């Protein structure tokens, strides 16, 4: 089961957002949110909001009784360039310099972890039983 969230026409260049998105591709949602919260880049907040929206979409589609946020992982993050806003900066002697204000489109796809991975993680989280001592007679 997949869920998608899109953030379009974000006022940041796609190149800057791709640098941060490479940090969290193919990782768990909880781990990705922790990485984004401590990343000192402006693109991290854009990605964090979009990722939270994708998780909310997944929980809304499947239902909270069947699916939990811990069971999700990021399948893919796509960062495309959007339209470029062109502005003009006046210069001396009647010249004009062009300023390009770039935008980007974010797409975050989350999916449920494979069941094998979940069972391994659950085994790691469970406390190990101590071996019983043999009773002396």
Image (cartoon, rainbow, N blue to C red):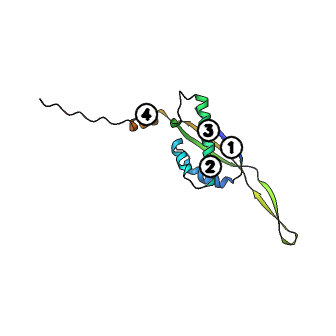
Residue beneath the point at 64% across and 48% down: 46
Q: How much space separates mark 1 and mark 2, taking CA atoms?
A: 12 Å
Query: Is residue 21 in view from this perspective?
Result: yes
Instruction: Determine the residue located farthest toward the right in the rendered image.
Output: 94
Distance CA(mark 2)–CA(mark 3): 14 Å
Identify the mark at residue 7; answer none if there is no mark.
Answer: 1
Quadrant the N terminus occupies: top right
Give the mark nearer the N terminus: 3 vs 4.
3
Dot 1 lies on which element?
strand
For marks 1 and 2, give the one nearer the viewer.
Answer: 2
Residue 45: numbered disc: 2
Q: Earlier in the sequence, mark 2 or mark 3?
A: 2
Q: Secondary structure at mark 4?
A: helix
Q: Are marks 4 and 1 in contact (CB under 8 Å)?
A: no
* Helix, strand or loop under label 2: helix
Classed neighbour count for the residue bearing mark 4: other residues with Cα under 10 Å, few (<14), some (14–19), many (≥20): few
Q: Which residue is mark 4?
A: 119
Residue denoted by label 3: 54
Q: Nearer the viewer, residue 135 or 96?
A: 135
- Front tag of 4 and 1: 1
Quadrant where the C terminus lies?
A: top left
State the separation of the CA atoms marked 1 and 3: 10 Å
Q: Position of residue 113 (x, y in %)?
A: 51, 36
């Amino acid at each position: 089961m997949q869920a998608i969230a899109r953030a379009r026409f974000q006022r940041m260049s796609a190149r800057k957002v791709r640098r941060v998105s490479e940090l969290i591709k193919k990782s768990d949602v909880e781990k990705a949110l922790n990485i984004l919260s401590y990343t000192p880049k402006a693109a991290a907040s854009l990605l964090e909001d979009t990722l939270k929206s994708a998780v909310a979409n997944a929980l809304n589609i499947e239902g909270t009784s069947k699916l939990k946020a811990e069971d999700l992982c990021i399948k893919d993050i796509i960062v495309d360039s959007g339209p470029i806003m062109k502005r003009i900066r006046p210069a001396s002697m009647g010249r004009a310099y062009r300023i390009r204000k770039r935008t980007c489109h974010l797409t975050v796809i989350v999916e449920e972890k494979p069941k094998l991975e979940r069972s391994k993680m659950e085994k790691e989280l469970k406390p190990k039983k101590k071996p019983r001592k043999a009773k002396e007679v």
